[in-house]
Amino acid sequence: MSFTMNVRAAGATMITLAVLGAAMAYAAPPAPARAKGNAAAGKAIFTVKCFACHKLDGTGGVKLTGNPTPNWKDPKTWADPKRKNADAYMRDCITNGKLPSGMVAWSKASPPLKPADIENLIAYIHVLSGRK
Ligand code: HEC
């Protein structure tokens, strides 16, 4: 008797969880490919921490020890297959750096940039690129 009730209770719990799971999946769709950061907040960081190597207008071309900084205003830059998922590529570069080229791992800098700062910077780089 009590066994039967436990099975029923477990069944009811699982149905409840499934319904909850479906509701949560609906409420939180996967993050869009496009950065949703705040470009103005990104600009405030960029003009202090990034412009020396990337230039204020994002045209780059500054070479330290490896690859030069990219020209974000050049459509050819964005056509490169490594930037197919541009936001993910930029997020990785800003978070983990490109140490052989001298690009800083900003998530480990002191003070470190927070994930929200990085999203804001990605949004600003899109603005600099002039692409829609
Ligand atoms: C000391 C110089 C330096 C500074 C400062 C710097 N970067 Fe970089 N960054 C580089 C170099 C060099 C590369 C090219 C790395 C490579 O391709 O190997 C790069 C690459 C990148 C990339 C990859 C872009 C692409 O499309 O290839 C992003 C995004 C980026 N930097 C963002 C930033 C941001 C945001 C900041 C400021 C928080 C910043 N960088 C500060 C040197 C710098």
Image (spheres, grey):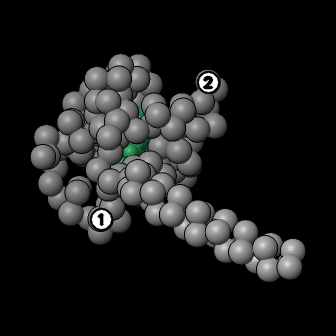
Q: Are marks 1 and 2 in contact (CB under 8 Å)?
A: no
Residue 64 % position (x, y):
45, 42
As drawn, is 11 to the left or to the right of 51?
right
The circle on residue 111 is 2
Instruction: Please state which of residues 91 and 100 is positioned toward the viewer in this rendering.
Output: 91
Instruction: Name the quadrant where ligand 1 sits.
Output: top left
Work out whether residue 44 can be spotted. yes
As drawn, is 11 to the left or to the right of 131?
right
Residue 125: name its quadrant.
top left
Please name the residue shown 29% across and 50% down the image.
Answer: 34
Residue 40 % position (x, y):
28, 23
The circle on residue 57 is none
As drawn, is 48 to the left or to the right of 17?
left
For mark 1, give the secondary structure. loop
Along the polypeptide, which appears first: circle 1 or circle 2?
A: 1
Please name the residue shown 67% across and 74% down the image.
Answer: 11
Residue that lies at the very extreme toward the right in this rendered image: 2
Distance Cα–Cα, label 1 vs label 2: 30 Å
Q: Which residue is mark 1?
A: 84
Residue 130: name its quadrant.
top left
Residue 20 % position (x, y):
53, 58
For mark 2, give the secondary structure. loop
Q: Amino acid at mark 1?
A: Lys
Instruction: Please state which of residues 91 and 110 is positioned toward the viewer in this rendering.
Output: 91
Please name the residue shown 51% across and 38% down the image.
Answer: 115
Q: Amino acid at mark 2?
A: Pro
